[in-house]
Image: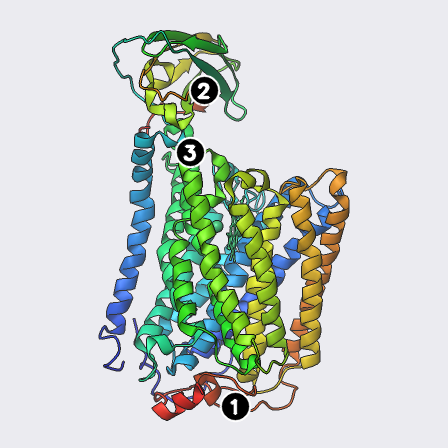
Amino acid sequence: MNDHQSKISNRALTARLLLFAVGMFAFGFLVLPPLYDVFCDITGFGGRTNATAVTATERPDETRTIRIEFVTTVNEYAPWSFAADVDSMQVHPGKMYFATFSATNRSDQSLTSQAVPSVSPVSANEHFKKIECFCFTSQEFAANETRTLPLQFIVDPDLPEYVDTITLSYTLFKTENSYVSRTR
Amino acid sequence: MTTAVADAHEHHGPEKGIKRWLFTTNHKDIGTMYLIFSLIMFFAGGAMALVIRSELMTPGLQFVHPEFFNQMTTMHALIMVFGAVMPAFVGLANWMIPMMIGAPDMALPRMNNWSFWILPVAFGILLSTLLMPGGAPASGWTMYPPIVLQTGVAFPFLIFSILLMGLSSIMGAINIIVTILNMRAPDMWLLKMPMFVWTWLITAYLLIAVMPVFAGAVTMLLTDQFFGTSFFLAAGGGDPVMFQHIFWFFGHPEVYIMILPAFGVVSEIIPTFSRKPLFGHDSMVYAASSIAFLSFIVWAHHMFTVGMPLSGQMFFMFATMLIAVPTGVKVFNWIATMWRGAMTFETPMLFSLGFVFLFTIGGFSGVMLAIAPADIQYHDSYFVVAHFHYVLVPGSIFALMAGAYYWLPKWTGHMYNETAGKLHFWMSTIFVNLTFFPMHFLGLAGMPRRIPDYSTQFADFNWMASVGAIGFGLSQLIFVYVLLTSKKGEKATDRVWEAPRGLEWTVPSPAPYHTFDTPPVKRVSEEAFE
Ligand code: HEM
Ligand SMILES: [Cu+2]
């Protein structure tokens, strides 16, 4: 309006502010979700653990013993029974271990399940490595079928000194389609 | 987009009848509509609050089903936040900012009309969900997934109405920024601007920065529900906690969107009734700007219980506590303004003093909540309810009342009924404390928020809170009485008060339909700020 003030016209200033708003929408909708994923994958925040198989060489450290606890949850009212076959294990870092879980489809229809893992504490996430896991893919269950679900894992010897217990939790979801959409 | 001069040259008065209101581009008309709309929403949201408090008056379930109770808490919050507090401040901005900076109107008058008329549509949609099968949304105003995805038919309507509200706020904010940056009178330098204008400038930037992010978050909810994405669905590889992060990235700045203009209003009023200039005007500007900046880096204090690493908890705890510093600067400046002033206690001043005192209590409980280890106990308890009601009711709402009483004579040309105003203040203050103070104790004793029933040990304090709420609700009818009789009082002078500062007091009372068609000359502005 007055020349000693802003040299930008109303129209140009409005356009800039609109652009800013659109940019913030894009930031929220397009940038934040992938950024969040990358951030969590790198840091292990949110209980992230590897979602696809990794390879690891064994270099056992028999001097340390770590307690691995298993926690299982069924999401909402999905018709499953789901439990770890042992509640906990004592393991040495750098050594490969097997564990099994059992799940039963208690409904009269075939169902697809997806288990979602989470590891606690955060400082253990990157050191708990799943070599083989039923959570890597979704599982088809026939009506009333019971299945044993395998897990093979190794705890990295670089696990920080102060960690003596790692909790691995699985939540079992009923999914209509298989494990798609975004990768974890 | 239109420019400011578009209708500034046509010197006709308002059109007659409904058309005046539907098509108006006049900042005063639009300001009035915003204010009346927000008052209606205030009573709608208040009625819901009374449903909540009636149910909670005694233990056990008496009046409503738990499902409906949850709908009430959700709708109450959405209506109060987006329908009452925010539009009321936009209404004040519309009325006052052009008059305070010597501009003929808002910079984008036609967009201004749009941003108002979107609101009744948005809230019509939101309120209509009460009649839908499955009822209104019941997930809480925070709309966390997965629970919000269990909303019935109402779900897409909820999202759509939120998107409309966001659109309205963004348009309003753009308009305010362009007006403030481009339409000031020749010698109104930025640092000379009245505090209300300053706080609104900062608020408007906050709005443009976070409302779109919020729109993004609810759009993701929508696509998760209907288009097969899994942004927040764990089974599909998403993470419900991500919603909380995005929501609070919006949500915390949002609480400052609701309080910064309130800071502005009381910063106008306290100097007038202390008969002294605002102490530390520039430091107030810097304090408000630092609050705005800090509000972007504290969001996870709402999420201390989701399982954050220690370093994260520490960061968000200290960043949050840091906000108390600029907030403290503001409170001290208000007190310093009053120090040795020739104070009088008209209704606007009473509400402002109530604001300073009671808002500070809310600030203190905020700092308690910011202590991560303590918050693990306080979180989702009535202590949080007490905290945010202290900052919002005797905070934002009191500031709005103060502003309404302060500028009412300028709007109507008549003095309002001072006795009724004072009664309104004292009743509101007594009852607001009776309602919300006991909630601190309830929360510390472990009563969770958002529940329709509770253990009998909480009965006494709940009864007090309910009595207070009914009293507070009834007290607001005094305000309606003041408004209805607002043209009956003696004629107001142009300056209205004894020693007000600012250009709005140089125009006649009531303010004519068009003011400052030509910018005020330097002498006028200087006298206005003496
Ligand atoms: C000194 C300043 C403040 C501090 C340190 C502070 C801190 C906090 C913290 C830590 C919480 C989370 C509590 C929990 O959920 O466990 C919270 C909640 C909240 N605060 Fe504040 N706050 C401050 C000022 C404000 C202001 C000015 C407003 C609004 C005008 C506000 C509105 C809210 C609301 C609405 C919530 C609850 C949101 C919800 O969960 O529904 N706060 N505050
Ligand atoms: Cu916050």
| Residue marked by disc 1 | B494
Q: Is residue B420 left or right of residue A91?
A: right
**Residue at coordinates 60% horizontally, 80% vertically from top-left?**
B343
Residue bearing mark 2: A167
Colour approach in the figure = rainbow
Q: Chain of mark 3?
A: B
Residue type beneath disc 1: Asp
Chain of the residue that carries numbered disc 2 in the rendered image: A
Q: Is residue B61 visible?
A: no
Dot 1: element:
loop
Contact between marks 2 and 3 (CB within 8 A): the answer is: no
Tell if the residue under mark 1 belongs to the same chain as the one under mark 2. no
Q: Position of residue B226 (x, y in %)?
A: 41, 38
x%, y% of residue B513? Answer: 46, 85
A60 left or right, relative to B274: left
* Real-space CA distance between mark 1 and mark 2, rounded to the nearest whole angstrom: 72 Å
| Label disc, if present, on residue B309 of the rendered structure | 3
**Res. B527 image quadrant:** bottom left
Dot 1 and dot 2 residues touching (CB under 8 Å): no
Amino acid found under the numbered disc labelled 2: Thr
Foreground: disc 2 or disc 3: 3
